[in-house]
Image (cartoon, rainbow, N blue to C red):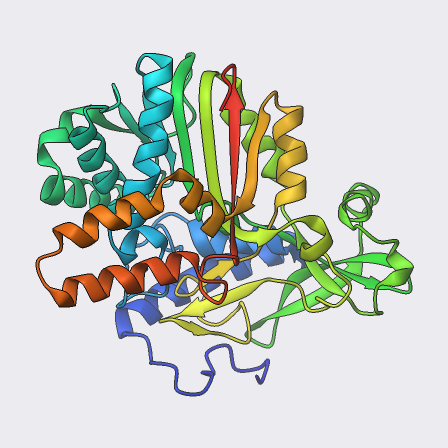
Amino acid sequence: MNKNDLHQQPDALPVPEETERERSARLASSIAAKIAVAGGWISFDHYMQEALYSPGMGYYSADGHVFGAGGDFVTAPELGSLFARTLALQCASVLNRLGGGDILEFGGGSGALMAELMLELDRLGKLPERYRIIELSASMRARQRTMLLERAPHCAERVEWLDSWPSSPWHGVALANEVLDAMPVRCFSLHEGEVFERGVSYRENAFVWSERPADPDFSAAVLAALPEPPDRYPDGYQSELNPSLAAWIAGLSENFAAGAALLIDYGDLCAGRYHPARAQGTLRAYYRHRTLNTPFWYPGLCDLTADVDFSGLSNAAVSAGFEIAALDTQANMLLAAGLEEVFAQSWEGAKDTQQQLRLAQEAKQLTLPGEMGERFRAILLSRKMDL
């Protein structure tokens, strides 16, 4: 891509609508101004924060269509009901053993997970006392409310939205599905065993990568995350580090009195996440289900994401006072939680052959290695209860 053309399109990429292009231009001007104030360079997590979450302009903050076939990606809850109904069995078990409690979802997405969970928990007679969603985007909250009122209106009185973690002790189940991958990451490269930070500058009307020697703290964090000594990595090796992961887990832990937390995302243990062969890292940008070759194309219109380091996540969880109840692929987690039972019930209750075929396709997407089955991992954390 010509770095002098900020909006040059990858092949066959749809042209954004005029209103989208105007919003992106406002966001680009805002980020460029911040870069100028910072002296011509900002870290990539700063850029990613603005591109995804800048109020009214960022990817998740603006009123756009990001989920489903008409958006930029499809999450497991949007595939159908199997995913949520299987998670509902786990939630019901925890709530039953606790004698009740709340469900806390971090980032509610389209609201599909919340709506289907509530419907299934109602069917099981295990509705939570409250279903709480930490969601900062006003447009996403509106979308979740619409989903709730359309699909589970009788559960609406139990659902509430929060701006931050609960401020008083609570017990129950915490859920985060495809949330951690959207946290801003800092990018780095290795040159002759030294750590460099890959940040963002603005030159000739375009955002460009710009490297500089990493500060001591960031360099130490990178070296601590790598499973191999830096001299075993190819020169120019690139990857990412989530600087907020430990703080996020600590926030979850602070007033979590008892229960379980289930976190599902795409990623790997550190040996795979930071393998020397993965020399280009895992940072990706998506627009309309297409992978872009730059994270700077029309800021605010494309999704930015990076794989989760589940080893780092596990260490942070233990440090925050959780126990690791399970860490496995999404496929194994769903099968252990009762996916086969849920599938059999759904298959038997299907109206016709076409619906059965959709169920079979959904199960394949959730479990096959080439789909979400092994690409996604799940970690189950516990606090003051055995799972």
Q: Is residue 350 left or right of residue 43?
A: left
Residue at figure coordinates x 74%, y 68% from the top left: 277
Residue shown at 16% from the left, 51% from the top = 348
Would residue 39 be visible to someone looking at this image? no
Question: How many numbered discs sit on the rendered protein?
Answer: 0
Answer left or right for 207 relative to 8.
right
Q: Nearer the viewer, residue 188 or 76?
A: 76
Q: Where does residue 301 sit, x and y in percent of width and height?
A: 39, 65
Judge by depth and name the residue closer to the eye, 150 or 355: 355
Q: Where is residue 379 in the image (x, y as percent from the top left)?
A: 53, 38
- Residue 34 location, quadrant: bottom right
The foreground one among 138 and 98 is: 98
Measuring from the top left, give residue 306's x and y in whole percent: 56, 57
Instruction: Give x and y (percent) for residue 216.
Output: 84, 44
**Quadrant housing the N terminus:** bottom right
* Looking at the image, residue 311 lies above or below residue 94: below
Q: In this view, does 287 lie above or below 387?
A: below
In the picture, measured across the screen, residue 229 lies left or right of residue 89, that is right
Residue lying at 40% horizontally and 62% vertically, measured from the top left: 26
Mark yes or no: residue 54 visible. yes
Residue at (25, 37) in percent of width and height: 117
The image shows residue 225, relative to residue 290, as above or below, that is above
Q: Which picture quadrant has residue 193? A: bottom right
